[in-house]
Image (cartoon, rainbow, N blue to C red):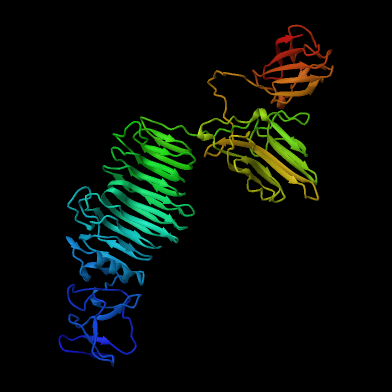
Amino acid sequence: MFKKIGPGPAAFLLIGSFTVISPLLLCAQQGKVGINTKDPTETLDINGKIRIREGARKGYVLTADSMGSAYWSNPAALMPDHGTICITSLGAIGDGTTDNTAIIQQTIDSAALTGGSVCIPPGIFMISSTLNVPAGVMIKGSGRGSTLTGTPYNGSVIKYSGTSRAFEITGAGAGINNLVIYDDNNGGAAGALAILADGIIIESCDLANLLISGFATGTALSLHAFNSGGIAFCTFQDIRIRHAKTGIHLLEDPGSFVNSNTFNHGAISGGGFEHCLLAEGGNNNIFNQLVMEPYSSAKGHLTVTKGSITGHDIRIEGMNQPPQVPLIEFAPGTYGSVLTGIYGGGLTVDHGNNSIMLRSGKAIKPANTGTNLFMNPSFKGYSASLLPGWDLGGAGVVEVIDPYLFAERKVLKVTIQPGNTFILKPAASSLPVIMNDARYDHCNFGFYVKADRANSVLTTFNAPAGMASSTPHPGDGSWHFTGMYGFVDRTQPLSPCLRADNSTGSSDLVIYVTAPALSFGSSSPVIESQPITSDGGIIHGTLTTSVAVAPATLNMLLPKEGNVFIIKGTSAIAKINHQLADRFPRGAVITLLFDDAGATVVQNAYITLRSPFVSTVNSTVTLLSMGDGTWRELQRNL
């Protein structure tokens, strides 16, 4: 029931069981005693009679916050937009001089009780200290106005005159949009806006359509996780930053993380910058189409000292950047960042292992190649249990069969008996050379494998922290590329290998292996080989050709991957690969190297010699294929 108490304007108090009509803390009639105070009533006697203090009017209701403090509030201040509160309905004045800190913070606290929103209409609302935005509160401005690149600002404006930060978001699901935030303290503020994860996980914050200007001694937007806190899955849309010491700062303390946040569009410009984007930690933070174009920056437009970022279609320009100051810099030990887009040129320094693919008419950054660096990835030339370029370790019966997945890529069929393990690794003489460039700090490698026993086949690698292993083949009887991305141990030889383990099996393990591939850096290796150009070319250095062993027979069939053939025995040779399906292409050159004396190469319609040839030990004859199953002698050595 309601009871009218005391003289003066009609006022009502809910008595009996106390009910908070609205948990939203509202305020009005600034300066009236009883309105917006914690003491809206006074006690008349020991029986609990109370009287409403002066200033309360008809239509006001008594509300309380989470601490139980009561206030008189005007229900008319409640807007129909699901509990949105307009700060001007509560007494905020957007004249650029009135300090609105207490009113706006009080409104934010009230909105936090139900996860409501706070409306900031057009006007310049001055604040002198930090506004804390807890979980679930959305602050909504009415727009950034029509003077984005200069004063006077005429949108929804927060004018900050303090020395700390204008806003601090300290809970999940909060957000700020459609506002201007600028520093009115002659650049004396520490920052404009920060998300602070102090021992908690903050996610799903939404910041959009903000203009942050004038924070010449501070950071426009910072994400800082500390005390085992984390910031993740937050979205930043069209953040415009002008004139700051640091534009965007990502910072994680040990044991904390800043991961998987997305920045879409936005621009950073103006003067006074040390950094446009500074990442001191964090992974998987994505920047889409961000523009960074101050004329210069004191320490670099984009600097990553720890962690990694991804920048898609970004644009970086520094027309007056000093040549000795990197426009882009990645610190030693960083890896995995990927940048694409354009930039105006300037010093780019990557002390780590990152992919920088920015286009410029004035500068470039070399990238890792995806070329397959394994020698003999086609498994050709297998003979007498030897496979050129590879070591076959452990125990296994190896058979080389025709290509299956890729043309020219032969398949190893390996049978491993119970109690045994088979290892396939590059021969020491065929290992790729590790250079001192940081692009060689990581290695990607693997093999196409088919197996029908789970957890039996995987790849291993000698990483700096010890042996590392890949995810094993699922054993589903299908082909899968089984491999890994590994850190290179510069103190040890490169050691990528395939391991098939049947040490605890009770039956034979049969696996199929083809198309091994290896590359350095962040790019996955290309499986297919690059052809020699049809325009010809010059080879510098040692040219290595394939060697195979074959018995001397009348109609000799040689493997077509060979160039030099060690011939054993003393039989006569009258035809060499004369059948249509077996012929060498026109222009192929082969050399027959004879282990034994007395073998005869017969001169006939298939082989044209300068004179009859009978071998001596280590004698040779070199033949040229005419492409139709016939051969002509080029030279001999008897």
Q: Quadrant of the C terminus?
A: top right
**Looking at the image, which is closer to me, 85 or 453?**
85
- Pinpoint residue 430: horizontal percent, then vertical percent: 65, 29
Image quarter of residue 559: top right
Image height check: is 232 above or below 371?
Answer: below
Residue 95 appears in the figure: no
Q: Residue furthest top?
A: 611
**Looking at the image, which is closer to me, 188 or 629?**
188
- Pinpoint residue 497: horizontal percent, then vertical percent: 67, 39
Q: Residue furthest bottom?
A: 47
- Pinpoint residue 492: horizontal percent, then vertical percent: 62, 35
Image quarter of residue 7: bottom left
- Position of residue 490 in the picture relative to residue 147 (left or right): right
- Position of residue 169 in the picture relative to residue 252 (left or right): left
Q: Residue at x 24, y 83 (%)?
A: 41
Q: Quadrant of the N terminus?
A: bottom left
Image quarter of residue 74: bottom left
Image height check: is 365 above or below 415?
Answer: above
- Position of residue 614 in the picture relative to residue 25 (left or right): right
Numbered circles on residues, count: 0
Image height check: is 430 above or below 129?
Answer: above
- Pinpoint residue 2: horizontal percent, then vertical percent: 26, 89
Q: Residue at x 42, y 47 (%)?
A: 280
